[in-house]
Amino acid sequence: MSIFGREKVVVYIDGSNTYNKLKRLGLPDEDKRFDFSAFVSHIIGERRLVSKRYYVGIVRNHDNSEKSEKLVKKQQQFLETLRSTGFEIKPGKIMYDGGRIREKGVDVKLAIDLVIGAADDLYDTAIVVSSDTDIIPAIKYAMYKKKNVEYVGFTGSPSLGMIKECSSQRLFAKEDLLPFQYLKETK
């Protein structure tokens, strides 16, 4: 516990994993965006936020196409919005394998930060918004260091492994997430 009496919290969001979970729930609506900053404020409650981190593979214009260029610009605008609300962006790589796109190193960065945060006493509680079970060894280490690790997942596709291994869990349904949408700006 911090010397100020409030629990110190760091929020770790796996961007691609969370995006895909939200998309499966039908969020955000087509004319809206998801307000990650308001969502983080909601999940931390009265606790003291030390850091909020967003882990994501960075899109490149790998084929010099107009479509790739639009994706690059769209992601850059989104990440700038996150930065402007206090998020620390943790970039990973994207591998283009034929027609498939895969992130590389994002889960590893999240896991390393989770371990370092526990070892350096950065937090009392880590809130992990990811269903990627590859980070379970890092979660186990944090708990070994007497840290709480909260799993935030989504109904319809929660991670049973994360539920089992974390100190606590919160699952959000689509209805719970509707207040965190806002209208896109039109130009």
Image (tube, rainbow, N blue to C red):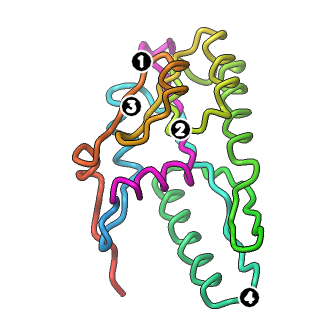
The Cα–Cα distance between marks 3 and 2, rounded to whole angstroms, is: 19 Å
Residue at 75 percent across and 53 percent down: it is 104
The Cα–Cα distance between marks 3 and 1, rounded to whole angstroms, is: 11 Å
Residue 16 belongs to magenta span: yes
Describe the element under mark 1 as helix, strand or loop.
loop
Describe the element under mark 3 as helix, strand or loop.
helix
**Residue 26 % position (x, y):** 33, 59
| Drawn side of residue 31 relative to residue 87, left or right | left
Residue 164 belongs to magenta span: no
State which tag comes first along the sequence, 4 or 2: 4
**Residue 65 % position (x, y):** 68, 89
Query: Mark 3 or mark 2: which is in front?
Result: 2
Describe the element under mark 2 as helix, strand or loop.
loop
Q: Which residue is mark 2?
A: 131
Q: Amino acid at mark 4?
A: Asn
Q: Amino acid at mark 3?
A: Ile
The Cα–Cα distance between marks 4 and 2, rounded to whole angstroms, is: 33 Å
**Residue 102 % position (x, y):** 70, 59
Residue 104: which numbered mark, if any?
none
Q: Amino acid at mark 1?
A: Arg
Q: Is residue 132 above or below residue 1?
A: below
Q: Are marks 4 and 2 in contact (CB under 8 Å)?
A: no
